Amino acid sequence: MAELRTEEEQLEAIKRWWKENGTSLLAGAVLAAAGVFGWNAWQDYQQGQAVAASSSYQQLLDLASRDSLDDGALAQAQGLVDTLQEDHDGTLYSELALLLEARLEVDAGDVEGARESLETLIEGSDDGYLTGLARLRLARLQSAEGNHETALATLDGDIPEALAAQRDNVRGDIYHATGQHDQAAEAWQSAQSLAEESGQPLYGISLKLDDLGDQEATL
């Protein structure tokens, strides 16, 4: 009888515990299950977003790779840029889209729009390589507009070492455009050396130096 009473008391204790804690335990289990489901759903969503962004960027890249775009293709490209900016803001694809947008705007004669796209990327991205590329392209635009000093100042901004040869190449172009041939030669020689050291030759540097030498020889 004592054993039976003990078992009954244990059963009653379990019942009481379940009555007091069972609801919260079930709720916790449900929340845990929901958490697992939610995490998986979030992962699936993220993967879907990445696929969508990649697809949109690939379409944009294909358009930008064409020799020329008609008005319809330009509108399609701008729509893809807008989609990447609005639906995938802060991703690598949205930042790459700004670089392509600037290129398309230059091709369309919208230099101001291109400048704004590049400045947006420089100000908003944490990717040093992409912002470095944007600075190089912005400097070329500024120099083409006659703002050579502004262009040189842009090149003095943060540009990673991986783009140092390209930076000096652009700097040489700017000096040459302003008639500063000695500085141009120095910048191009630096660009050539840096390119050779990195094993990534820049085509056209030797030709620029040769042309510059020919110009000086005729003076």
Image: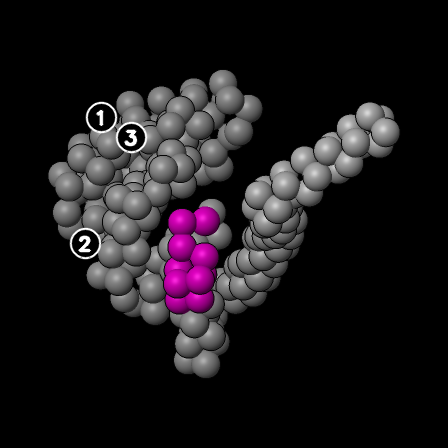
Task: Say left or right for 36 vs 206.
Answer: right
In front: label 2 or label 3 = 3
* Residue 116 in the image, given as x and y percentages of width and height: 25, 56
* Badge 1 or badge 2: first in the primary sequence: 2
Q: Quadrant of residue 41?
A: bottom right
* Residue 129 in the image, given as x and y percentages of width and height: 41, 35
* Residue neighbourhood size for the residue with mark 1, other residues' Cα within 10 Å, grouped as few (<14), some (14–19), many (≥20): some
Q: CA distance from mark 3 to mark 1?
A: 25 Å
- Tell me the residue that label 2 is attached to: 145
Q: Amino acid at mark 2?
A: Glu
* Residue neighbourhood size for the residue with mark 2, other residues' Cα within 10 Å, grouped as few (<14), some (14–19), many (≥20): few
Quick check: 155 above or below 82? above
Quick check: 198 above or below 206? above
Q: Secondary structure at mark 2?
A: loop
Q: Secondary structure at mark 1?
A: helix
- Placement of the N terminus among the 4 image quadrants: top right
Q: CA distance from mark 2 to mark 3?
A: 22 Å
- Tell me the residue that label 1 is attached to: 182
Q: Amino acid at mark 1?
A: Asp
In front: label 1 or label 2 = 2
